[in-house]
Image (cartoon, rainbow, N blue to C red):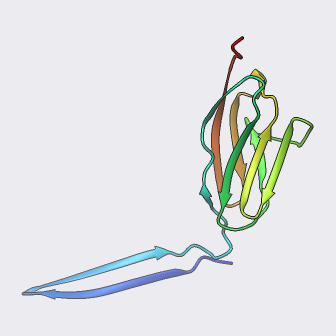
Amino acid sequence: MAPKLKTLTTLQSIGTFLILTSCLSRCVSEGDAVFVVKLQDYTATEKDEVSLDCELSKDVPVIWYKEEKEIVSSKTVVMKSEGTRRSLVLKKVEQSDKGKYVCDCGTDKTAANLNIEGKLD
């Protein structure tokens, strides 16, 4: 569906001056999902469980990435979808989990950096 364009033109007369203003705005298509709550950078300690959370304007599928590589669910990685809320849960994080995470819904993206600190004994 092509985006709709809306033009608003108004004329205002002030004394001997005539002011013409024109506003051209692009309307967002009703079908476009956007992130209304974005991912936040997070610092965790080794062996912690981390949940990276975001929320969309509508319930659409997402793809999670780490350093531009698609993430696959496993025993230690769980992807949750509850209504418009999306979460990536990393169980028992390690130094190798450090990096940039992206949640992509096709029409919008949100990203966060995960930092892992060593566990204090």
- Pick the quarter of the image with the N terminus: bottom right
Could you say which quadrant of the image residue 62 lies in?
bottom right
Q: Position of residue 37 (x, y in %)?
A: 60, 55
Is 97 rendered above or below residue 80? above
Whether residue 105 appears in this view of the structure is no
Residue at 68%, 74% in the rendered image: 31
Query: In this image, 13 relative to 33: left or right?
Result: left
Q: Position of residue 51 (x, y in %)?
A: 73, 41
Whether residue 63 appears in this view of the structure is yes
Query: In this image, 26 relative to 83: left or right?
Result: left
Is 44 rendered above or below residue 53? above
Is 91 rendered above or below residue 118? below
Residue at 83%, 41% in the rendered image: 71
- Pick the quarter of the image with the C terminus: top right
Query: In this image, 101 relative to 75: left or right?
Result: left
Residue at the farthest front position: 121
